[in-house]
Image (cartoon, helix red, strand yellow):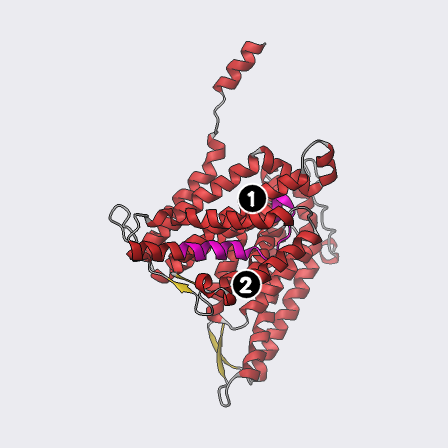
């Protein structure tokens, strides 16, 4: 029996194709992205998206895996970025033989060093105590950015030039596409390492400490040590994201340490879903698109992002990833097709209602804040008069009508979803014949 078990274990591969397939597909997709979207502005957006993904995954190591709510995690990304910028300037001034692709390592080490110091006293407790300590440390270091000018550069920040570094196989990183592939390399490496960390005993125990720290202590594990290790590892990857930010934008300012950035990464992680590893990835992609693309179309983009965040917390606490995983049993049972009609009957009117609401808000905002005599505006690629009553009435009708129809069909959609996740669910009841059909 032992020989059979040993032979079976010897034949079992360490990494199956099923486990490696998502990583291979994602890597291939990232490699061909610049050939699909060739504009420099689009590549810059993708660079920002990749950096945000690394930072969001690092933050999820605290919140999603360890249950530690941090209000000042941007300082580890910012301090790591500032250190990388100083090293980059030293490479230029003293001709240090340091290739640019290795620079994020120093940002990660510096972020981990700061996280080690702060985590030594902040990880004693979780919950409100940890959150308030993180908020105080974040505000303290953000205030030091104005005081310690030699390191943080004051209000002007610390600039640099990545092209003055040591060429890497003849590449001087002059073009955004060169920087893109450098960031993609670190994105794949960092995401893979964070995923492997979540599969280690420490990562597993971080989930146990998050859910029930007293029981973990009873089993002989130190909840403080587990939180401390997760905190320092998160600081390392946040510093890596800071180093990539320094390479991409070639300047760091006090905004990289601010509470606003810490709040944004909290929003991104919740929006994507803290209970899933790929949740922060979805949140980072959606938020970056809203921040870059939607901000070019409207000045009220932050209002819509805030409304989306509130709706996610209230109605979809699992985030966007949770919404996707809700349909995994339907896919497994082969009942996804039964959801098409109920979803269309509910979601299409809901989208129309939301667009009508947004259109009404945009018309009212333009009518109140536009310059005197400026009555024309563009809404959904349509030119209209914001001072006319017709557009206001149309958007109100679309908003009220769309939401009313969506609410009417919402119970049918919920019932269809419940039937799709139930293995032996009975078919939907037949509609009673109408009076006309009976006649």
The N terminus: image quadrant: top right
Image position of 345 (left or right of 18): right
Front disc: 1 or 2: 2
Can you tell which mark lies on residue 142? 2
Q: Do tag 1 and tag 2 residues touch (Cβ < 8 Å)?
A: no
Q: Which residue is drawn at the image coordinates 52% and 73% (left, top)? A: 299
Q: Main secondary structure of the magenta part?
A: helix
In front: 75, or 10? 75
From the image, which quarter does the C terminus lie in?
bottom right
The picture places residue 258, in percent across and down from the top left corner, at 54, 63
Does residue 278 show up? no
User: Is residue 402 depicted above or below 388 in this figure?
Assistant: above
In this image, 434 relative to 117: left or right?
A: right
Which element carries disc 1, helix, strand or loop? loop
User: As displayed, is residue 105 above or below residue 408?
Assistant: above
Residue matched to label 1: 277
Q: Which residues are magenta?
A: 63-85
Check residue 74 for magenta coloring: yes
Residue 172: image x %, image y %? 27, 53
Image position, residue 160 (x, y; %): 36, 61
To which quarter of the image does residue 325 belong? top right
Q: Residue at x 67, y 39 (%)?
A: 223
């Amino acid at each position: 029996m032992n020989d059979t078990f040993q032979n079976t274990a010897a034949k079992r591969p360490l990494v199956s194709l099923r486990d490696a397939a998502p990583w291979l597909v994602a890597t291939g997709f990232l490699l061909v992205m610049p050939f699909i979207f060739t504009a420099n502005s689009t590549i810059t957006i993708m660079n920002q998206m990749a950096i945000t993904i690394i930072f969001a995954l690092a933050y999820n190591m605290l919140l999603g895996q360890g249950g530690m709510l941090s209000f000042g995690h941007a300082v580890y990304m910012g301090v790591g970025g500032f250190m990388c910028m100083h090293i980059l300037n030293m490479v230029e001034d003293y001709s240090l033989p340091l290739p640019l692709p290795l620079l994020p390592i120093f940002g990660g080490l510096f972020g981990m060093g700061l996280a080690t110091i702060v985590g030594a006293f902040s990880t004693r407790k979780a919950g409100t105590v940890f959150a308030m300590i993180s908020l105080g440390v974040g505000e303290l270091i953000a205030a030091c950015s104005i005081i310690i000018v030699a390191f943080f550069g004051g209000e002007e920040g610390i600039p640099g030039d990545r092209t003055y570094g040591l060429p890497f196989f003849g590449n001087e990183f002059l073009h955004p596409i060169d920087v893109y592939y450098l960031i993609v390399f670190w994105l794949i490496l960092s995401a893979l390492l964070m995923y492997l960390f979540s599969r280690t005993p420490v990562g597993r125990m971080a989930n146990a400490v998050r859910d029930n720290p007293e029981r973990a202590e009873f089993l002989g594990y130190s909840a403080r040590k587990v939180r401390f290790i997760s905190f320092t590892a998160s600081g390392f990857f946040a510093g890596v994201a800071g180093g990539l930010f320094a390479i991409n934008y070639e300047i760091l300012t006090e905004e990289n340490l601010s509470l606003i950035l810490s709040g944004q990464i909290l929003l991104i992680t919740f929006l994507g879903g803290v209970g899933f590893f790929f949740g922060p990835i979805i949140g980072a992609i959606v938020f970056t698109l809203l921040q870059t693309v939607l901000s070019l179309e409207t000045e009220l983009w932050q209002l819509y992002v805030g409304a989306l965040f509130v709706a996610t917390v209230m109605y979809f606490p699992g985030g966007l990833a949770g919404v996707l995983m809700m349909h995994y049993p339907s896919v497994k049972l082969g009942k996804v097709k039964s959801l098409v009609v109920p979803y269309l009957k509910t979601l299409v009117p809901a989208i129309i209602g939301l667009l009508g609401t947004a259109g009404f808000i945009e018309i009212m905002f333009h009518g109140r804040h536009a310059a005197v005599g400026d009555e024309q505006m563009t809404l959904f690629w349509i030119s209209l008069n914001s001072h006319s009553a017709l557009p206001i009435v149309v958007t109100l009708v679309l908003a009220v009508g769309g939401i009313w129809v969506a609410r009417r069909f919402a119970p049918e959609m919920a019932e269809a979803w419940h039937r799709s996740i139930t293995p032996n669910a009975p078919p939907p009841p037949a509609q009673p014949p109408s009076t006309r059909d009976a006649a």
